[in-house]
Image (cartoon, rainbow, N blue to C red):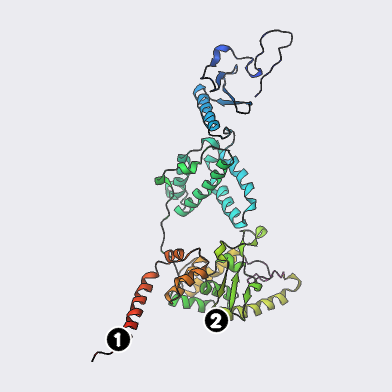
Amino acid sequence: MGEDTGKPSGQSGVTRPRHLRKVSAKRRTRRQAGRGAVIRRGDGRWAGRLQQPDGSVRWLYGKDQAAVEARLDEALKALGAGLPVPDARLTVGDWLREWMIGLQGLKASTVDYYTRYVNVHLLRSAVAAKPLAKLEGRDLAQIYQHMTTPTAAGGEGKSPTTARHLHAVLHRALADAVEEGRVARNAADLVPKRARPKVTHQEMRVLAGADHDHFLEAVRGDRLEALFVVAIREGLRRGEILGLRWKDVDLEAGTISVTGSLQGSRAANLAIGEPKTARSRRRLEVFPETVDALREHRERQRFEARRAGSMWVDEGLVFTNEFGHHLGITVLTKRLDAILRAAGLPDIRFHDLRHSAATDWLRGGMHPKVASERLGHASVGITLDLYSHVTPTMQREAVEEISRRRRARQPDAG
């Protein structure tokens, strides 16, 4: 706030700051030169006067003298580090709402992911009303603890994985706040390691051996047979399958090119965007049963298009609903669950079909490097780490094969 350089009407005397007209000199608290000033206003409120490097004056308030002194020291520390003075009025909730508006340039799936965690877990929590500048690591630790506490004990009963994802979202949001100078430090970095959500890796669930073959039999004749065949034989991600277009399928050559992925969680924002990573763009030599299933699917789709007539929307998609639109994720999940139940197969997620495909390849002798390229992994190390449950069998079979070949090279004794 600036100062009033005019004199009171009808009076002569020393010019006083407009803000301090009702404040006596006895109520000023001296501080070291250049460290600001603390006063008690006529209305009883405590305030701190801070002159910023550009010459402007900033007034800071607190419930008592000690609180104002602390705020002045914090502000001076920020200025000394080249940061703006934290805005005590900006709450965590205010910043998260502002942050989400700035996410619009990201992929739709990423925006949905961040927005869901913010709306469901953060804006409804008590921490949303807390000033962003006063957010502490212990505040976040309490959120994670409450999330993972069983509902019977008064918590939310969420998995450690969910809490871990929330921690990652918060870290990103607070890192952006630091980068924009809205706060001096990232409170997510201040969460003690012992209090950070820990994810326990569960054993991978796959359809292997007889279950793998049984699943292929169970989907035969289903409207989405080709989709499930592509998932369990070629290992494509769900978004890659739902974003697959006929122009990326060459049935004569027996190949599929992954060039896009369906992103978004609601019909209004579904769109085909870039695949998950640069390595996700890939060309696959597909299995013969995949080619056969896609040929039958193409004929079925052509029949559905004729039946729908003018209601058919041709977007060039391989897998659609009965009118050519994007296939709903909920529809896909429910159909998979029904097939598994009817066939008496283990209850797995759709993504586990991808794991099942990779497990079948590796057990069948496919080189891990080839499997990694087919899966679109960034490196073969990721593939080997993810499918470590397969490698003991691979090692044993490799040793047995090398031993068999060595015995075959040796001349018969005698």
Residue 222: give x, y in percent of width and height: 58, 76
**Farthest residue in the bottom direction?**
414
- For the C terminus, the quadrant is bottom left
The residue positioned 54% from the left and 69% from the top of the image is: 236
Of helix, strand and loop, which one carries label 1? loop
Q: In the picture shown, does residue 180 fall above or below 293?
A: above
Badge 1 crowding class, 10 Å Cα cut-off, few under 14, some 14 to 19, many 20 or more, is: few
Observer-nearest of 88 and 258: 258
- Region of the chain picked out in magenta, as a range: 313-327
Residue 199: give x, y in percent of width and height: 43, 54
Whether residue 45 is in magenta: the answer is no
Q: Which residue is mark 2?
A: 288
> On the rendered structure, is 204 left or right of 303?
left
Q: Could you tell me the amino acid type at mark 1?
A: Gln
Q: Earlier in the sequence, mark 1 or mark 2?
A: 2
Residue 336: give x, y in percent of width and height: 54, 69
> On the rendered structure, is 377 left or right of 42?
left
Q: In this rendering, does residue 406 appear at all?
A: yes
> On the rendered structure, is 200 left or right of 180?
left
Q: In the picture shown, does residue 89 fall above or below 99?
A: above
Q: In the picture shown, does residue 382 fall above or below 166?
A: below
The residue positioned 60% from the left and 40% from the top of the image is: 94
The residue positioned 30% from the left and 86% from the top of the image is: 410
Q: In the picture shown, does residue 279 fall above or below 194?
A: below
Find residue 410 and name its label.
1
Q: Could you tell me the amino acid type at mark 2?
A: Pro
